[in-house]
Image (cartoon, helix red, strand yellow):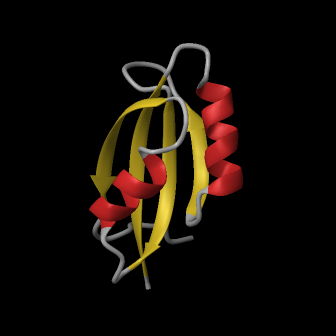
Amino acid sequence: MMTAIFVFIKCELGCANDVAADIVDNVEYVSECYSTSGQYDLLAKFSLPKDMDIGTFVTRQVQTRPHIRDTFTVITFSPFTPSR
């Protein structure tokens, strides 16, 4: 079982594409990364093992990547999916 977290990422000016490529290529557990408008430049979704410490993962594996200035993490609980 995995826990989904979403991390909003603010990048140094002009570096959003490089940061996104770096995360997709080099950070384990990333499933998607989107460019966004507004306060943050990117939104990355990570699927972490249930027993993994989320704070440690974000501070060591995401915040330490080059050209990242700030992050905001959203932790999820129960997924809802459409019934078709």
* Residue extending furthest toward the top: 13
List x then y, in percent, for residue 82.
48, 65
Query: Which quadrant is home to the N terminus?
Result: bottom left
Splitting the image into 4 quarters, where does residue 58 fall?
bottom left
List x then y, in percent, for residue 31.
60, 60
Give the vertical position of 30 relative to 73 (above or below): below
Q: Which residue is found at the position 50% from the left and 71% from the top?
A: 83
List x then y, in percent, for residue 50.
36, 81
List x then y, in percent, for residue 23.
61, 47
Splitting the image into 4 quarters, where does residue 8 fall?
top left
Q: Which residue is found at the position 68% from the left and 31% from the top?
A: 18
Q: Which residue is found at the position 50% from the left and 20% from the top?
A: 12
Q: Nearer the viewer, residue 26 or 34?
A: 26
Q: Is residue 73 left or right of residue 46?
A: left
Q: Nearer the viewer, residue 35 or 56?
A: 56
Q: Which residue is found at the position 38% from the left and 68% from the top?
A: 79
Give the vertical position of 13 relative to 25 (above or below): above
Give the vertical position of 33 relative to 66 (above or below): below
Query: Which quadrant is home to the C terminus?
Result: bottom right
